[in-house]
Amino acid sequence: MSPTAIADTTQDENLYSNYYLSEFIPEPCTKEGIKAFGKLFLPPLYSLVFLFGLIGNSVVVLVLFKYKRLKSMTDVYLLNLAISDLLFVFSLPFWGYYAADQWVFGLGLCKIISWMYLVGFYSGIFFVMLMSIDRYLAIVHAVFSLRARTLTYGVITSMVTWSVAVLASLPGLVFSTCYTEHNHTYCKTRYSLNSTTWKVLSSLEINVLGLVLPLGIMLFCYSKIIRTLKHCKNEKKNKAMKMIFAVVVLFLVFWTPYNIVLFLESLVELEVLQGCTFERRLDYGIQATETLAFVHCCLNPVIYFFLGEKFRKYIIQLFKTCRGPFALCQYCGLLQVYSADTTSSSYTQSTVDHDLHDAL
């Protein structure tokens, strides 16, 4: 065979090999546009959520200590919910810088911040669920609630809730790690063995503990509450029902899209859904819905202020005393008790009426 024939044969083989490889080996799915989108939009969004979440939940903590003095199970749950949201928002400055540049805080903080984020995530949702149960007992089982809704039981259930949240967050602490790739340092969850199985289990855990279980309990509790309130002739009934709908609707709006996207991501890991275009859109969806879910930690103080008569009164009184939300003054002693919240030895309302008033 002549050198020209050999060269032509070799060229044909190379062309065939390139065609064969291009047909059966997919090209890597580049996601540079997604990274650019995250650098541009995520840092300012995280900063706003951090600012409003920090101010709002700090005000809730001040009100609870200054005026409420943690005298009931409801107060304990409100305090723990505010602490959960604060724990969650404290992680956001780190994620904001990470989205803008790269992870520069080392392996230790990578594990701690990832774990803190998950503990705040799970505990916040769990305490929203516990508050739903608390309202259910107060209104539907008013007599039984006198024995069950005590400060002691509130502290015990809160400790159990924190324990469950910490245990559910342990994979984030164990598997979060730092690594450098293409001169860029990442802080992500990496599973050394059975990575697909772990990713799917993690997604299922978030969906079950973060949406399915709390949503099921909330729908059960609030459906029973609404049925009870329909037979209750009370001027505060409409306000109570508005708060109920606000809590449920906001929970659905801000958490459901994120859980749906995580479920779709688990289907991608299982190769049930494929395609580079779909994966890119899914990554955009994760960034958008995750940020939307973050906003929920700012909303609980807003709900209390606009729909909670007593909380609104306390917050206004707090700002009057402190001459503004940011002033540091000597009159904001945490041990002072607001006279309007002192306990009375007798009640003219029924038990349900009293619980409705306390919820508002």
Image (spheres, rainbow, N blue to C red):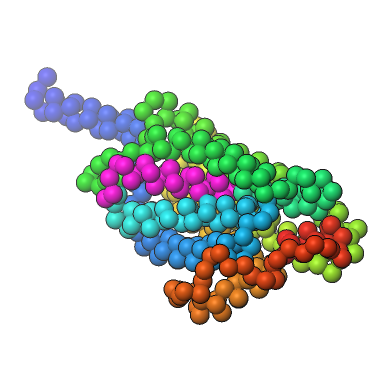
Residue at 36% x, 49% y is 31
Image height of 148 relative to 320, above or below: above
Q: Which stretch is magenta?
A: 104-126
x, y percent for residue 288: 49, 56
x, y percent for residue 25: 35, 32
- Residue 212 can be seen, yes or no: no
Q: In which quarter of the image is the C terminus?
A: bottom right
Asked whether residue 105 is drawn in magenta, I would say yes
Image height of 2 relative to 271, above or below: above
Question: Farthest residue in the front direction?
Answer: 345
x, y percent for residue 188: 37, 42
Residue 229 picture quarter? bottom right
Q: 193 or 165, which lies in front?
A: 165
Question: Farthest residue in the top direction?
Answer: 1
Q: In which quarter of the image is the N terminus?
A: top left
Give the prevailing secondary structure in the magenta stretch: helix
Q: In this view, does 350 lie to the left or right of 66?
A: right
Q: Is residue 69 left or right of residue 309?
A: left
x, y percent for residue 150: 71, 48
Residue at 47% x, 52% y is 87
Image height of 335 relative to 188, above or below: below
Q: 157 or 170, which lies in front?
A: 157
Q: How many labels does the image show?
A: 0
- Residue 182 can be seen, yes or no: yes
Residue at 86% x, 54% y is 228
Asked whether residue 45 is drawn in magenta, I would say no
Q: Is residue 357 left or right of residue 313?
A: right
